């Protein structure tokens, strides 16, 4: 990648990397936790109503969201502790 | 022998700087978790201190940037590093005393650049590193944190919009234990590494390490300990003043702000950008606030960040250069100058702390 004037001084590739990683991770983790909360809430409601199918579906959504969030945290730490 | 004395003073001064960095930034790291009641104040402060310590061991990329990417390590002496550190601490104290916005990270870099410039001229300053690794990332980080938090909270509200607030709050409070921990980890890794970089630079200048070396283990451990202790000690002041100037935000905003701030700082740390963690966290808090209601954000804080961004590096450079000019009067290799300046600095710091503590602390995080 080559941008005029500051292209060789400023490491635009690294800055772009920071932008898309931070934007992706920050938004993705928040979405994952939101879905986990949504899943937990709806699963509890469905269990109270005796709706087994919805309980399973929303329970799975909760586990999926939680798993995605934990995976993102672990991945972040692994990437941080590894050298390029 | 005199060189050894100067090196000891430099290491002591750098660790003192690290301690004050943790002390100063505790509010930014724990305030969101405490204000949303995700964690009890005592737990939040202890948790942040532990993760600050752990975070310091995660990466060395920022330390490498500070040690070899901003000033020419071969031209720098321990006296130059000392003057830069004192310049940074002096500028931090001046801004802290008068309640002006500042960044410890930018002050440190500005101080070292200023003293190196006065000592060895423009050749000692790596302009490309200063612009490419410090100035531009410093501008990008708060904007990126703001944008990330704003987008994240919009998605969160969209997903959990119709659920009962009680359940949602409980869920995000649990999430904040993780996001708050990541933020403390990110703060520890970026800020402690700046001190590691400065001590490494002094060790290279003293001839103990080859240029481009990584920080020795004792430097990593002492830097991690200093910032963790600073965070812990600083936290007790925050606990005592809780409820007066704390951020008002809901748990979803708290989670989005902490997660986004941590993501920006960790990503930048991985590629070696020494950021202002305060500015980044403030940007994230404002983004999470603005996405819900633009008027909820105190936009004056954003203006202060811009002023601090423009002012801190040049001002700390002037102070660092001035300190070097004073110290070098006693001779470049003489320990007399650093001893005198360190003694005066300690006395002035104690006086300033005593006066300022009587007035109460200043919380620097943006309020949303």
Image: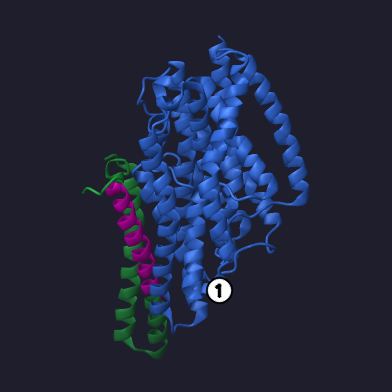
Chain colours: A green, B blue
Helix, strand, or loop for circle 1? helix
Query: Which residue is farthest left?
Result: A1
Q: Looking at the image, which is closer to me, B85 or B53?
A: B85
Measuring 60% from the left and 50% from the top, which residue is drawn there?
B101
Q: Looking at the image, which is closer to me, A74 or B71?
A: B71
Residue B177 in view (yes/no): no
Measured from the top left, where is residue B302 in percent x and y?
Answer: 53, 60
Residue B249 in view (yes/no): yes
Query: Which residue is farthest top?
Result: B1
Q: Magenta stretch: dominant SS?
A: helix
Q: Which residues are magenta?
A: A11-37
Q: Looking at the image, which is closer to me, B112 or B230?
A: B112
In the rendered image, the quadrant that contains the C terminus of chain B is bottom right
Count how many numbered circles sit on residues in the image: 1
Measured from the top left, where is residue B216 in percent x and y?
Answer: 42, 26
Q: Chain of mark 1?
A: B
Measuring 64% from the left and 55% from the top, which residue is drawn there?
B363
Measuring 31% from the left and 56% from the top, which residue is drawn there?
A21
In the rendered image, the quadrant that contains the N terminus of chain B is top right
Q: Residues within 10 Å of mark 1 (few under 14, many from 20)?
A: few
- Is residue A14 within the magenta segment? yes
Q: Report the side of B120 relative to B89 (left or right).
A: left
Q: Report the side of B68 relative to B347 (left or right).
A: left
- Note whether B5 is above or below B295 in the view shown: above
- Note whether B206 is above or below A1 in the view shown: above
Query: Which residue is farthest front?
Result: A5
Q: Looking at the image, which is closer to me, B174 or B15?
A: B15
Measured from the top left, where is residue A58 in percent x and y?
Answer: 33, 79
The residue beneath circle 1 is B295
- Note whether B124 is above or below A65 in the view shown: above
Q: Report the side of B255 relative to B96 (left or right).
A: left
- Is residue A47 within the magenta segment? no
């Amino acid at each position: 990648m080559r941008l005029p004037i500051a292209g060789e001084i400023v490491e635009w590739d690294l800055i772009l990397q920071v932008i898309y990683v931070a934007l992706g991770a920050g938004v993705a983790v928040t979405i994952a936790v939101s879905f986990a909360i949504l899943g937990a809430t709806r699963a509890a409601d469905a269990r109270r109503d005796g709706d087994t199918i919805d309980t399973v579906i929303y329970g799975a959504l909760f586990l999926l969201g939680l798993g995605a969030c934990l995976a993102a945290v672990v991945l972040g730490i692994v990437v941080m502790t590894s050298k390029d | 022998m005199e060189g050894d004395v100067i090196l000891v003073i430099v290491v002591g001064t750098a660790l003192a700087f690290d301690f004050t960095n943790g002390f100063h930034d505790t509010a930014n790291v724990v305030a969101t978790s405490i204000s949303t009641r995700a964690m009890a104040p005592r737990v939040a402060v202890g948790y942040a201190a532990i993760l600050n310590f752990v975070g310091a061991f995660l990466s060395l990329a920022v330390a490498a940037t500070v040690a070899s990417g901003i000033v020419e390590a071969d031209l720098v002496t321990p006296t130059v590093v000392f003057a830069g550190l004192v310049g940074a601490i002096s500028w931090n104290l001046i801004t802290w005393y008068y309640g002006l916005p500042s960044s410890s990270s930018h002050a440190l870099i500005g101080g070292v650049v200023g003293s190196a410039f006065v000592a060895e001229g423009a050749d000692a300053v790596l302009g490309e590193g200063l612009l490419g690794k410090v100035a531009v990332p410093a501008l990008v980080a708060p904007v990126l944190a703001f944008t990330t938090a704003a987008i994240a909270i919009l998605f969160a509200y969209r997903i959990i919009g119709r659920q009962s607030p009680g359940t949602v709050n409980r869920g995000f409070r649990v999430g904040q234990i993780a996001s708050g921990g990541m933020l403390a980890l990110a703060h520890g890794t970026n800020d402690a590494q700046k001190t590691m970089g400065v001590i490494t630079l002094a060790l290279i200048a003293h001839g103990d390490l080859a240029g481009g070396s990584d920080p020795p283990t004792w430097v990593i451990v002492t830097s991690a300990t200093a910032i963790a202790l600073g965070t812990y000690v600083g936290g007790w002041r925050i606990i005592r003043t809780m409820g007066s100037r704390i951020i008002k935000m809901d748990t979803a905003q708290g989670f989005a702000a902490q997660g986004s701030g941590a993501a920006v700082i960790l990503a930048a740390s991985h590629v070696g950008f020494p950021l202002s963690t305060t500015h980044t966290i403030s940007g994230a808090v404002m983004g999470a606030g603005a996405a819900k209601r633009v008027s909820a954000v105190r936009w004056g804080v954003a203006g202060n960040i811009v002023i601090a961004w423009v002012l801190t590096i040049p001002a700390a450079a002037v102070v660092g250069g001035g300190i070097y000019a004073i110290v070098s009067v006693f001779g470049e290799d003489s320990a007399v100058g650093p001893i005198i300046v360190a003694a005066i600095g300690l006395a002035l710091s104690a006086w300033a702390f005593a006066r300022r503590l009587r007035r109460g602390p200043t919380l620097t995080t943006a309020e949303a």
